[in-house]
């Protein structure tokens, strides 16, 4: 009995010593370990945790690393928000994503492990979305401010901001514009060209339609639509037209019955459709090094659509909408060339929206 009691006391003492050792190491660790080190510890323990193979010390280590890392990130977010500075949102976004990714790693662990480390899931979707939106607003405003004073240092900083936007919101519509400005604004002489494969027929006046820009400027910089042999161009904006497609002429019909009082009419609603599509790339080329700096695909269509109706029976049964359609008649489909020119005008509008945006 005495031996048994002593053995129990020794086990209890051993547990106390272990806990004290862990707590002492935790205090020292929590003061020195940064978030990256804590995340390394978490990543190291996760595989064992998934198999429920953590011992007491490892469980405690996972718990302290997880909560300490989150605490540090939350503390930094609070510090940034308290500063009120406009440039805080990039870091807030990354810290919020770190917390979210960290908890996703732990959320898949067995319930026993999550309970042991006191895991509570947090929904950070709104926080991340808000930080992403404000970070993008800051990046765009800051980059455009830097572009007002073009020099090597400002360009480097602007390009770093664009890389951040790629990470924060890779689907952002602002990325292309900021990238284009980063190569166009520092240039000295710009030539704008429309190019097609040798075998493709594309009327010259359509090319002029595509390059019909106000004052021949892109982002306020002058360009030549016709190359000048006396100029040494450092940048070319080339509109590659790789493919032109003309759809077959078709008429889509829907027949239905309309009734009113004792009158009845059979109506056929007809829609004439034909379209032209231009596919290609907007290329920004470093002329000196013959290097394509930016390659943006486009797909532009112009669609002819004409709707009219035919009816048999008593048209007094028709609705006002149908009566309006009955006033219209079948007309000739547009020619292929006229549709191509319309597509060229659409491409011109697209280019203006890109290059002459305020």
Image (cartoon, rainbow, N blue to C red):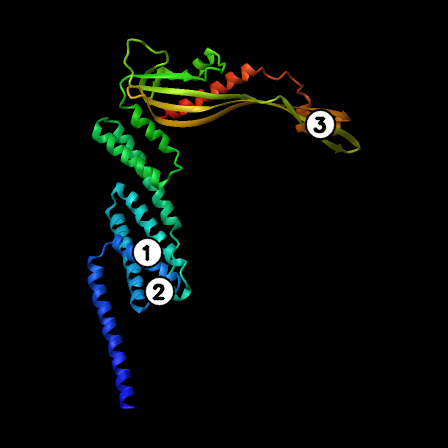
Residue farthest to the right, as pictured: 262
The residue that disc 3 covers is: 268
Badge number at residue 256? none
The residue that disc 2 covers is: 118
Element marked by disc 2: loop
Badge number at residue 43? 1
Element marked by disc 3: strand
At label 3, counting other C-alpha atoms closer than 10 Å, the crowd grade (few under 14, some 14-19, many 20 or more) is: some
In the depicted view, which residue is nearer to us: 266 or 115? 115
What x and y, as percent, mark residue 54? 34, 65
Quadrant the N terminus occupies: bottom left
At label 2, counting other C-alpha atoms closer than 10 Å, the crowd grade (few under 14, some 14-19, many 20 or more) is: few
- Against 82, residue 326 (above or below) is above
Work out how far the residue at label 1 is from the one at label 2, CA to CA, in angstroms. 18 Å
Element marked by disc 1: helix
Q: Earlier in the sequence, mark 1 or mark 2?
A: 1
Going 46% across and 11% down the picture, which residue do you hit?
A: 205
Please state if 275 lies on the left or on the right of 102 as rendered. right
Going 21% across and 64% down the picture, which residue do you hit?
A: 27
What x and y, as percent, mark residue 213? 39, 17
Q: Earlier in the sequence, mark 3 or mark 2?
A: 2
Labels 3 and 2 touching (C-beta < 8 A): no
Quadrant the C terminus occupies: top left
Q: Nearer the viewer, mark 3 or mark 2?
A: 2
Going 34% across and 40% down the picture, which residue do you hit?
A: 167
In the depicted view, which residue is nearer to us: 275 or 294? 294
- Against 207, residue 321 (above or below) is below
Labels 1 and 3 touching (C-beta < 8 A): no
Task: Confirm whether residue 356 shows in the render.
Answer: no
């Amino acid at each position: 009995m005495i031996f048994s009691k002593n053995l129990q006391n020794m086990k209890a003492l051993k547990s106390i010593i272990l806990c004290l050792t862990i707590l002492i190491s935790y205090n020292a660790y929590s003061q020195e370990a940064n978030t990256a080190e804590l995340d390394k510890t978490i990543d190291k323990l996760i595989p064992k945790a998934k198999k429920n193979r953590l011992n007491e010390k490892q469980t405690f280590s996972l718990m302290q690393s997880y909560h300490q890392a989150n605490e540090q990130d939350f503390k930094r977010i609070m510090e940034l928000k308290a500063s009120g500075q406009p440039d805080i949102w990039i870091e807030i976004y990354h810290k919020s994503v770190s917390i979210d990714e960290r908890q996703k790693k732990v959320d898949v662990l067995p319930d026993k492990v999550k309970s042991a480390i006191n895991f509570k899931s947090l929904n950070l979707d709104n926080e991340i979305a808000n930080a992403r939106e404000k970070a993008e607003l800051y990046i765009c405003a800051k980059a455009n401010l830097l572009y007002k004073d073009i020099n090597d240092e400002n360009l480097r900083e602007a390009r770093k901001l664009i890389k951040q936007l790629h990470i924060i919101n890779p689907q952002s519509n602002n990325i292309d514009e900021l990238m284009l400005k980063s190569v166009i604004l520092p240039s000295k002489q710009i030539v704008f060209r429309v190019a097609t494969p040798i075998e493709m027929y594309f009327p010259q006046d359509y090319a002029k339609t595509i390059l019909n820009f106000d004052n021949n400027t892109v982002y306020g910089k002058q360009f030549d639509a016709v190359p000048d042999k006396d100029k040494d161009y450092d940048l070319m904006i080339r509109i590659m037209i790789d493919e032109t497609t003309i759809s077959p002429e078709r008429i889509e019909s829907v027949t239905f019955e309309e009734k009113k009082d004792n009158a009845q009419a059979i109506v056929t609603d007809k829609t004439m459709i034909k379209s032209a599509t231009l596919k290609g790339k907007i290329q920004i080329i470093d002329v000196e090094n013959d290097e394509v700096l930016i390659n943006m695909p486009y797909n532009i269509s112009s669609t002819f659509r004409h709707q009219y109706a035919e009816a048999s029976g008593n048209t007094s049964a028709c609705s006002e909408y149908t009566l309006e359609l009955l006033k219209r008649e079948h007309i000739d489909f547009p020619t292929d060339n006229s549709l191509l020119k319309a597509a060229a005008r659409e491409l011109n509008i697209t280019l203006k929206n890109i290059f002459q945006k305020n």
